[in-house]
Image (cartoon, helix red, strand yellow):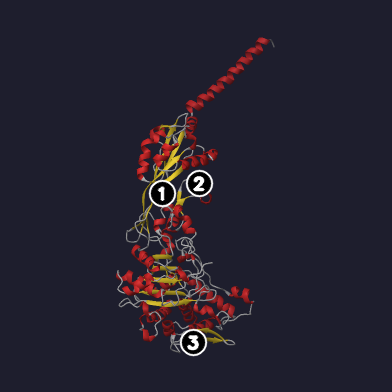
Amino acid sequence: MNDDGRHIRLLIGLGVVTLLLLGRIFSLQILSSSYKEDADRNATIYETIYPTRGAIYDRNGTILVGNKVAYDILVTPREVKPFDTLALATVLDVDPGFIKSRLEEYNKRRRSIGYQAVTMIRNLPAETYMRFDEVKYRFPGFRGQVRGIRDYPVNAGGNLLGYVSEVNQAYMDAHPGEYKSGDYAGMTGIEAAREKDLRGEKGYHIYLRNSLNQIEQPYKDGVMDKEAVPGQDIVTTIDASLQQYGQELMQGKVGSLVAIEPATGEILALVSAPGIDVSMLADIGKHWNEISSDPYKPMYNRAVQASYPPGSVFKLVNGLIGLEEGVLRPEMMYSCNYGYHFGAGHKLGCHGHKSPLNMEESIMMSCNAYYCYVLKNILDNRKYASVADGLDAWHEYVESFGFGRKLGSDFPAELSGSIPTSKTYNRSYGKGRWNSTTVISLSIGQGEILATPMHLANLCATIANRGYYYIPHIIKASEGVEIEPQFYEKQYTMVDTLHFPKVVKGMWRAVNSGPGMGGTAWIAHVDSLDICGKTGTAQNPRGADNSVFICFAPMDDPQIAVACYVENGGFGATYAAPMASLMVEKYLKGKVKRTDLEKRMKEANLMSRVKHD
């Protein structure tokens, strides 16, 4: 083939390749919009629109948590041009060194930040922000951001409400794809429990930027922008007035107050003391060191996270199990000679009172010996092959009251407490090497029994309902918000409902039998309220005994059940019973007539009694 032929073929080949390339370019640039969109994307910048976080209301429509405006200054390091540092510092009312150090820090992270805006100053005063807004054109790369932060019209307690904070890497890793740096989320309390409802949905504005990375105009006239969707408002079961009153009573004390509506399981008050004042929540970062270094651990919500020995209030559970097992009848009498004597000189002590007693009187006077006999009869019941089998049957009964497990509340961080089984003692003593008297302290709510104040309030609600409870919960169903079906279901114990009135009568006598009649909770008496209660004094290896009390009222139409637990408070009637009964009086009557008692409880300060690890 001659040279001319080869030359012609080469030209034809080049022409074909050129046509194919031109066709591809035409397809990408003219026929296909994706190329243009990719190019546009490289020339666009997204500005996040943060939604308004949902408000939190109490059961009566009072706003517990709302929103107010906050002003931030953002900077995009790659867009910053030479500027007058002193002038900017004067406008923002900050030290020039602060601005320089921040920019140096951001420039070190320039590669990871890219064209992302980072927050340089948070919660700027409105006047300062407006001053900056007027001159921002002088400072390329700096811009303002208006966002909502939490506002607290009512001091309903930081442990209850929880706080909102900027997410960290660990939080983003735990919620992949849901958050990015600069986003905020509920970290504790109700804010965390209902984060998905409260947070809303972010939106954005898209802007075009030029070759100098300066914003020029909205992308496609804003048609591609997305509006933010506000968060859903939440209605809680909390009674704000009662919650505040409980916090006033618990001031200067360590412990908890929990109030439940028995007919629904709705939590009326959830007080943990000492707690976090709501004034610290809006800017938790500013107060974090103060809070985290406090030896009383105010972040620790004792209502659901502290496990305590329940003390004598647990006698009610053992009495009910004894009735169901047929080893106890209400008329049965047992003697008490300042305690229960067993083995070679061993004794579980008791205070002085009438002897012998029947079941009602044993509850009214809180006799320890009586319930030692009851527990021994339960565990040594001949229908069980061994004491170990008897204890495991007892354990199953106790669990049916909600003890030894999480109740399943919608409030976060709930602990399960602890109820022993035969395996517990087999590990400690060896299989077959322990008996009913070895574990006799279980009869009075001591030993290896641990429960949270929420468990105790739930026990009280169960007795008030005569044998069943609704899982305690803190969110009410409202428009746009549903609660889980289990919160509407009755949870029956393994004890027949016919036995509960026998216990209720003893609880009524404990509160309503005069001082000369032996009622251990006479201090909780309020005319016409028919309060039923049970005192407890739980042994505490770290100081004075803990003061415990549970009560409900009225007896025949229970509206409220309360558990009060005061660390190092001494006898149940010293602090827990007065404060729990004041909560009942406040809720049912709207005001308190026992003002002297109220004053004494509010002014009592027991903090110095509490020993820390």
Secondary structure beneath dot 1 equals loop
User: Which label belongs to residue 177?
Assistant: 2
Residue 68 vs 407, above or below: the answer is: above
Residue 7 in sight in this render: yes
Work out whether mark 2 precedes mark 1 in sequence or the reverse, and give the earlier one: 2
Residue 466 vs 289, above or below: the answer is: below
Q: Of the residues shown, which amino acid type is indicated by label 2?
A: Gly
Q: Is residue 559 left or right of residue 314?
A: left
Q: Is the residue marked by circle 2 packed among few (<14), some (14-19), or many (20+) residues within 10 Å?
A: few
Query: Residue 50: where, in percent of width, then height?
Result: 41, 45
Question: From the image, which quarter does the C terminus lie in?
Answer: bottom right
Work out whether mark 2 precedes mark 3 in sequence or the reverse, and give the earlier one: 2
Location of residue 555 (image quadrant): bottom left
Q: Which residue is the extreme one toward the right?
A: 1
How far, Cα to Cα, is label 2 from label 3? 65 Å
Q: Of the residues shown, which amino acid type is indicated by label 3?
A: Tyr
Residue on which the image places disc 3: 338
Secondary structure beneath dot 2 equals loop
Work out whether mark 3 precedes mark 1 in sequence or the reverse, and give the earlier one: 1
The residue drawn where x is 49% and y is 35% is 78
Tell which of 1 and 355 is nearer to you.
Answer: 355
The residue drawn where x is 32% and y is 61% is 60
How far, Cα to Cα, is label 3 from label 1? 62 Å
Query: Residue 119: where, in percent of width, then height?
Result: 45, 43
Q: Of the residues shown, which amino acid type is indicated by label 1?
A: Gly
Q: Is the residue under label 1 in contact with that under label 2 (CB below 8 Å)?
A: no
Secondary structure beneath dot 3 equals loop
Residue on which the image places disc 1: 200
